[in-house]
Amino acid sequence: MRSADLTTGSIYFGVTYEDDAFKRPIVHTYEYLGETSGAKEAPYLFRFVGSDDEMQLGERQLDLILDAAGLIELLSRFRDGKPMQIRHAS
């Protein structure tokens, strides 16, 4: 995700993998809480949905975050047996 595309209060997703072959995805759901003041290195604040746990990400880490369309695209690749690596922003 690009920081300009984040919307406070919206739901986003993170996908990690159980295996090194990217064949067993684990999907995490986050709510974007907005930018935090005074956190230059990681100003983007997310809450893990289902808990009060939060995480802060920096600009470079945002390419680990997907919106619903990105998650659907990634899971479609999984369904079709295609590689599931996340496209990284350039």
Image (tube, helix red, strand yellow):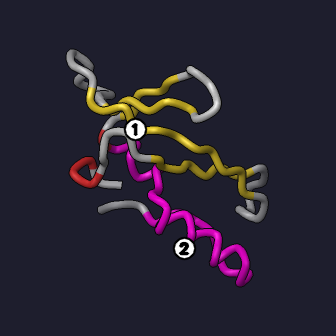
Pointer 2 with pointer 1, Cβ within 8 A: no
Q: Is residue 27 magenta?
A: no
Percent across and percent down for residue 48 are 56, 32
Percent across and percent down for residue 44 are 33, 33
- Residue 57 vs 19, above or below: the answer is above
Taking the image as shown, residue 14 lies to the left or right of residue 66, namely right
- Residue type beneath disc 1: Tyr
- Residue 75 vs 45, above or below: the answer is below
Read off the residue under disc 1. Answer: 32
Percent across and percent down for residue 9 are 38, 39
Q: Residue, x 58% and y 69% (percent of image)?
A: 74
Q: Badge 1, how many Cα within 10 Å: few under 14, some, many 20+?
A: many
- The kind of secondary structure element at disc 1 is strand
- Residue 9 vs 36, above or below: the answer is below
Q: Residue, x 58% and y 65% (percent of image)?
A: 85
- The kind of secondary structure element at disc 2 is helix
Taking the image as shown, residue 13 lies to the left or right of residue 83, namely left
Read off the residue under disc 2. Answer: 73
Q: Residue, x 33% and y 28% (percent of image)?
A: 42
Residue 51 position by quadrant: top right
Taking the image as shown, residue 73 lies to the left or right of residue 32, namely right
Q: Badge 2, how many Cα within 10 Å: few under 14, some, many 20+?
A: some
Q: CA distance from mark 2 to mark 1?
A: 20 Å
The region drawn magenta spans 60-87
